[in-house]
Image (cartoon, helix red, strand yellow):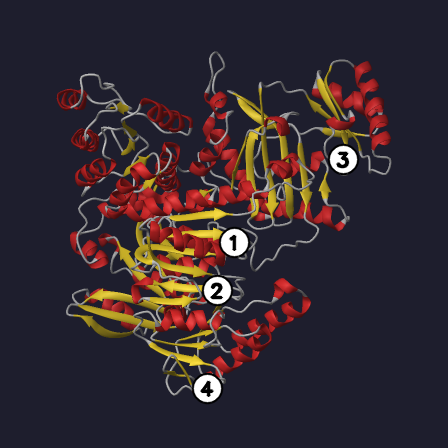
Amino acid sequence: MKRQLQKLFYPKSLAVVGASRRQGSVGFAIINNILDSSYSGEVYPINPKYRTIDEVRCFKKVGDVPGNIDLAIIATPAATVPDLILECGKKKIESVVIISAGFKEVGRKGKLMYDQILKNARKNGIRIVGPNCLGFLNTSIDLNASFASRMALKGNVAFLSQSGALCTSILDWSVTQNVGFSHLVSIGSTIDIDFHDLIDFFGADPHTACILIYMESLNNARAFMSAARAYARSKPIIVLKAGRSSEGARAALSHTGSLAGNDLVFDAAFRRAGIIRVDTIAQLFHLAQALAMQTLPKGNRLAIVTNAGGPGILATDYLMEHGGQLPKLSEEVVSHLNKVLSHSWSKKNPIDILGDATAKQYGLAVASCLADNAIDGVLVILTPQDVTDARDVAEQVSAVCKGARKPVLACWMGEEDVQAGREVLEVNRIPNFRFPERAVDVFLKIYSYFKNIELLYEFTPAIPQAFYPEREKAATMINDVLKKGRYRLNEREGKLLLSLYGIPVNLGEIVSSEKEAVIAAKKMGFPVVMKIASPDIGHKTDIGGVRLNVQTEVAVKVAFNEIMASARKHYPDANLEGILIERMINKPTELLIGANKDPFFGPVILFGMGGIAVEVFKDRSIGLPPMNMALARRLMEGTKIFELLKGYRNMPGINLEELQFIIYKFSYLVMDFPEIKEIDINPFVIDHEGGAVLDANIVLDQAITADPKHPYQHLVISPYPSQYEKDVVLKNGHKIRLRPIRPEDEPMEAELFERLSRETIYFRFFGYINEVNHSMLSRFTHIDYDREMAIIAEVKDRNKYKIIGVVRLIAEAWNESAEYAIVIADSWQRLGLGNIMTEYIIEIARSRGIQKIEADVLESNEGMIHLLRKYEFDFRKSEASEYHFEKNL
């Protein structure tokens, strides 16, 4: 696949099928764009009507072309395309762009042609961009393989769009704003090549530093998330997702379903992948400009330099309202500015240098801010004044910003009076905006990207105690319910299921008569809670199906009859199992913990304020499983009620670690059972002494049954693969546990480095490592199990576990090959552990469909050379002191 995408976007030869001399046609625009550019590859126009086009020989069909063709661009009527794909297959063309429209978007006939194209392409190993697309541009090879009217400027931003019209708009804007692109790709109907393929390709593209996406729909959420998580850490990915509507918040059977609207799930998924989401085309453009032109902020502290008080106040208001900080100027900066500015300047941030400020004073003020360690970025605002030359100020600001390690954004307010200044700023790669709020918004969004990445890969604490869910009992319970033709658990069943995963519940007793109700209440002790028990009734409170604080035997009898009567009235056909009696629990804080199955991203976890007004306040946070302790904490922090949970005024805080652990366990329940459609725990009551589930509503999915061979296919993020855990015995009799690495293993990974000699480190990393820090360790421990597998060898020593070896396999996106590496602690070498771990990782590679394993080894690393030759790796000398090993699987 990588080879095919390389041929597609960096073709050495291409054919334009449907090339034309007829002005105004798509075929004319495409061939004209290519021939008029400085693209150096071979170009073959294909059209039986012509012998030549623009003095270039034209062929009747691709099969007539004498040479090889890397890429075919098809711009012919839709009905001709399926057969043209077969012709491309005969010519061994592996990459195709289909410009043509008129397929599934026009009805059944078009859908049949669409399906035939895909069938023909797969039969011949062809990868396709489109159909119904604009084409693409690659500025590094001066190729405009589209019918866009102009070429983009060279830059380092790749723009991927499902809208061809948006491509042409951003292209037109970019030229006037001096913003360059590495690639613009219109992906059209995504019959084959989709966002995840392009993220993987441009993520590794040396000409691309960040990726912009305009998205209308998403076909393969798991592959998209995997690709985005692989590259968002090193290359910012910005998405404008169209379709923010109430469609996702469809009618649901629980509070969770109505609160976890689809657009909110996209927000949660993008955060989890490290993606920046924007809401408007303007934000997309502005972020593209800033990312293309400026360094990125390490914090949210913004200094504002302005010659007018009003715009400075507006910028400050927006900054503070949206999570930024207005840093206090240091005494050194104030002292310096007192010497170079008017004595009436503001003496604080925003730095109002007044309307008569000179260009030199602007430059000095900006330079002072850039030198202040308490400032992360600078916004320079200019309003037109009689004594202010917008161009001179722009030149001074540009001069002091050269080589700056902090972002500088500009707001030249006005139009004609400041246009000359804007042009200077653009030439000097300083993004400029019409309004100060837009500049502040860009600064904060770029900062939020870094903050989110930092949080995603923060240190992950271990769970506070061992967790052994009773999965088999839970599976039996769910299967028993399904066998009865039911798709909703009653409340008691729901609580039992939760308790099997270690979640504390208030488990009561279902009774079917007044007498049984009184006996149960006396056994539990007054006061009690009484609820209707029925798998057909979800929101019990809405029909008068709940009585709280029932104090006496008489009150129990009355409540029993009233609840049953109300239930029969509102649900005459419901299966009424009786009344659920529970002990009354009084705790001040009510929470909602829920799960809902999203059509794109599968199960999502919801946390927030609970109680009967949950849909009124809508204080909730959404996350994707799997959850670890750190991610559970982030989920909680995304709500307003989190401040109360920490402790507020005279109310003591709760045990936050205990609540994190409950969310952790809850996510495992959702992961383990794709049959679960919705879970609604409301309320989960809690105080400083602990918490319990008071009500649970669990709905099963009628269309899903578990697949034992692929138990986690319903998730978009692969969970910890426990199937790879196993015990082995070394030559010296030591029992070793082999298992996949976890984020929680970071401390043990750090300790492993302490047990590695300098020589071992040099052999493994082809150099010495001066510092082992969190950033480095998190890259080793936070891995995407869909793409990478790291198996650790773990041994227990004096009641403490430690890592004594790691074997790692990093696959490229399409599983065509994977890079192998291994390191064993020095004191555990020559005991057969390297053999065992290598053999095991090869076995795992085969099971995952990886075609080839590769490794680079220093010539002096005789132990590794011997190991790989033992497992029949082929090798060759790749560098003066290195060997390259390969093993085809």
Residue at image mark 1: 221
Q: CA distance from mark 3 to mark 2?
A: 45 Å
Q: Quadrant of the C terminus?
A: bottom left
Q: Which residue is mark 4?
A: 63
Q: Nearer the viewer, mark 4 or mark 2?
A: 4
Of 496 and 887, nearer the camera is 887
In the picture, measured across the screen, residue 879 lies left or right of residue 453, that is left
- The three-letter amino acid code for the residue at tag 2 is Ile
Q: Nearer the viewer, mark 3 or mark 2?
A: 2
The residue where tag 2 is placed is: 193
Amino acid beneath label 4: Gly
Mark 4–mark 2 contact, CB under 8 Å?
no
Q: Between label 1 and label 2, give the one nearer the viewer.
A: 2
Helix, strand or loop for disc 4: helix
Q: Nearer the viewer, residue 89 or 871?
A: 89
Q: Position of residue 817 (x, y in %)?
A: 37, 67
Above or below for 863 versus 13: above
* Alpha carbons under labels 4 and 3: distance apart: 67 Å
Q: Describe the element under mark 2 as helix, strand or loop.
A: loop
Q: Which mark is residue 889?
A: none
The percent position of residue 884, horizontal first and vertical second, equals: 25, 70
Tell me the residue that label 3 is attached to: 537
Q: Work out whether mark 4 precedes mark 3 in sequence or the reverse, and give the earlier one.
A: 4
Per the image, label 3 sits on a secondary structure element best described as loop
Q: Name which residue type carries label 3.
A: Ile
Between disc 4 and disc 2, whose residue precedes? 4
Q: Nearer the viewer, mark 4 or mark 3?
A: 4
